[in-house]
Amino acid sequence: MTIRFDNRVAIVTGAGGGLGRTYALDLAKRGAKVVVNDLGGARDGTGHSDAALKVVEEIEAAGGEAMSNGGSVTEYDQMVEMVAKAKERWGGVHILINNAGVLRDKSFAKMEPADFEFVVKVHLFGSANCTKAVWETMREQSYGRILMTASSTGLYGNFGQANYGAAKLGLAGLTKTLHLEGAKYNIRVNTIAPVAGTRMTADLFPEQAFEAFAPEKVAPAAVYLVSEDAPSNAIVGAGAGVFQSAYVTLTPGVALTGDACTPEGIADRWRQITDRTGEIVPQSGAEQSMLIMKVLQGS
Ligand code: NAI
């Protein structure tokens, strides 16, 4: 089975380089018409360049169809305008990969509030802006595939990346609710946690690893997750050709009734509270309440 995107229109944000460029090239090769969005800033989000235009030229040189967009994901109006232009030229928007990102690493002790805000603004608000800009179109079409870009930092933490991690786990949370709200309209929403040698990680990877972790070894997951038969609500780790699945699980826990419902009661039963035997992966927030009722009834 070949995964194709003929007659599909895809927007990839931050596609002027790194992972986004690779996603855009692959989607275009498989028949998608691609909006290459990127304001072409530096790693910390400052400055501008024509990075998006260059990727469009690459796509066109390979026989594909693309348009560039230099808007910032932080500006909702610019994202609305980008979607309008794509619809005007190609009649719809079927795929959105929220990939644009910046880094402003510092230990939390040294991090300025402005740097915390900026990073959350680009990743979390930026992805919400683009998604909001396409949401109504996807509902009307009864078709949408959206990919959020999280990170191992969001899922598991990383020293010096409090701002980035907060935004990235927020994106996994955004996926979960949009998955529920989009289901009725055939909108599927997933999260990818990539690991790739790009300028974002240039000072982290030794040279050989940089090659092994090429963006091309992540792109298959991104492309699959926005395809016709994509799953929904998945969190997929991808790096160097290894693909993983991450879950937010819940232990059954214990009921502390009567006088035992105290901080001391928690301390006494901490081992059982955190015992992962019988843990579940709730499919919605309501399942936590249902599990609580079940534990209460069994106590
Ligand atoms: P990159 O720096 O090459 O790509 C990010 C792109 O986003 C840049 O081209 C940049 O100009 C663009 N961008 C930044 N702010 C923007 C804005 N406001 N509007 C539009 N475009 C904007 O880095 P890379 O590695 O390709 O990152 C892609 C995504 O993957 C990011 O969200 C990043 O956080 C995420 N990620 C990457 C990992 C890695 O190992 N490379 C690890 C985990 C997550």
Image (cartoon, helix red, strand yellow):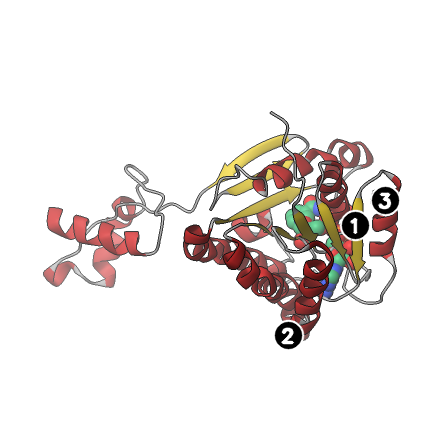
Q: Nearer the viewer, mark 1 or mark 2?
A: 1
| Relative side of 91 to 180, left or right | right
Residue 232 in the image: state x and y as whole percent.
48, 44
Residue drawn where x is 70% and y is 68% of the image: 81
| Relative side of 285 to 256, left or right | right
Which type of secondary structure does the marked residue at label 3 adopt? helix
Q: Are marks 1 and 2 in contact (CB under 8 Å)?
A: no
| Relative side of 138 to 119, left or right | left
Label whose residue precedes the other's in the sequence (3 or 1):
3
Task: Give the residue type at disc 1.
Answer: Ala
Q: Closer to the camera, 34 or 140?
A: 140
Which type of secondary structure does the marked residue at label 2 adopt? helix
Which type of secondary structure does the marked residue at label 1 adopt? strand
Q: Quadrant of residue 50?
A: bottom right
Compared to residue 199, the image places residue 48 above or below, namely below
Question: What residue is shown with label 2?
Answer: 113
Question: What residue is shown with label 1?
Answer: 66
Task: Give the residue type at disc 3.
Answer: Glu
Determine the CA span between mark 3 and mark 1: 7 Å
Residue 121 in the image: state x and y as whole percent.
63, 68
Q: Closer to the camera, 267 or 120?
A: 120
Determine the CA span between mark 2 and mark 3: 42 Å
Q: Nearer the viewer, mark 2 or mark 3?
A: 3
Question: What residue is shown with label 3?
Answer: 60
Task: Give the residue type at disc 2.
Answer: Pro
Q: Are marks 3 and 1 in contact (CB under 8 Å)?
A: yes
